[in-house]
Amino acid sequence: MKVELIAITQDPEALIARCARVSHRSEDRASPEADAKLIRRLIELGHESVLEFASATFLIEGISRAAANQLTRHRLASFVQESQRYVDVRDRALVRPPSFSKEAWQKASELYRQALDLYDELVGKGVPKEDARFILPIGAETRLVMCANFRELRHIIRLRGSKAAQWEIRSLAASLLEILRGEAPNVFYDLEVEA
Ligand SMILES: Cc1cc2nc3c(=O)[nH]c(=O)nc-3n(C[C@H](O)[C@H](O)[C@H](O)COP(=O)(O)OP(=O)(O)OC[C@H]3O[C@@H](n4cnc5c(N)ncnc54)[C@H](O)[C@@H]3O)c2cc1C
């Protein structure tokens, strides 16, 4: 899996703090230290709506369709996912679950090879890609772009980073958190992704 940050609000913490300060007319108190304190306090108090003023966009590649199906359930995020109707997906790999033994992985890889051969044959015989894809497994790789504001990103990381979540989306949540903490440490300071 590859997670790349392709866009983010400029100086996100300064912007969030500046917007939050409008309510108390305290813009004159802005400084990096005061902004950090303010943001953490707002999060502690549950006043997360101000986090909506900053957003980030990620290119996520090499995740399974199973994980993508889960991620795209988050309605406040925006997505574009590679289309299996239009794109030839013969070179997409199968994602390997960590629970698969060497033998299980060999069998799965062989089955996938057969599915790709059949896909190839069907497309070669004029079957549209949108129909040929029906024989591809849910573990096949996909790529997508996701954009969300910081409040929603916190929500996604909290839900998908919990122990109850599936390993692959948990790993994605860990990557998102690592990147976002580097960009906005005070907005994401309190989140943890459970191993
Ligand atoms: C561990 C785990 C297991 C899951 N298992 C299943 C499963 O078996 N089957 C299944 O179908 N799904 C499952 N899901 C998906 C889950 O039900 C949610 O659809 C998904 O997590 C999106 O969550 P959300 O609605 O909180 O988030 P988002 O869609 O990201 O929304 C963010 C928040 O905005 C608010 N919001 C958004 N839309 C509305 C609305 N229309 N009305 C009111 N408030 C709104 C809510 O406060 C919501 O929490 C699972 C999720 C997890 C984390």
Image: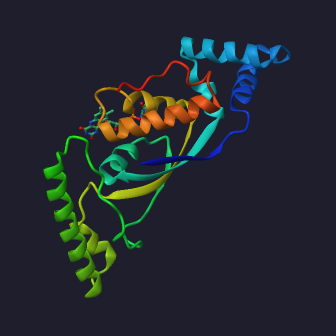
**Is residue 23 something one can see in this rendering?**
no
Q: Is residue 173 above or below residue 60?
A: above
67 or 113: nearer the viewer: 113
Residue plotted at (14% across, 58% down)? 107
Provide residue 175's location: percent of width, then percent of height.
47, 37
- Single out the residue that lies furthest toward the right: 28
148 or 3: nearer the viewer: 3
Residue plotted at (66% across, 33% down)? 53
69 or 67: nearer the viewer: 67
Q: Is residue 94 above or below residue 129?
A: above
Report ligand 1 position as a quadrant: top left
Provide residue 131's location: percent of width, then percent of height.
27, 74
Q: Is residue 74 left or right of residue 67?
A: right
Q: Quadrant of the C terminus?
A: top left
Q: Is residue 1 above or below residue 35?
A: below
- Single out the residue that lies furthest toward the front: 102
Provide residue 37's location: percent of width, then percent of height.
68, 12
Provide residue 189's location: percent of width, then percent of height.
56, 20
- Single out the residue that lies furthest toward the bottom: 125
Mark count: 0
The colour scheme used here is: rainbow
Residue plotted at (55% across, 12% down)? 44
Residue plotted at (63% across, 28% down)? 184
**Is residue 24 something one can see in this rendering?**
yes
Q: Quadrant of residue 41?
A: top right
Q: Is residue 75 left or right of residue 120?
A: right
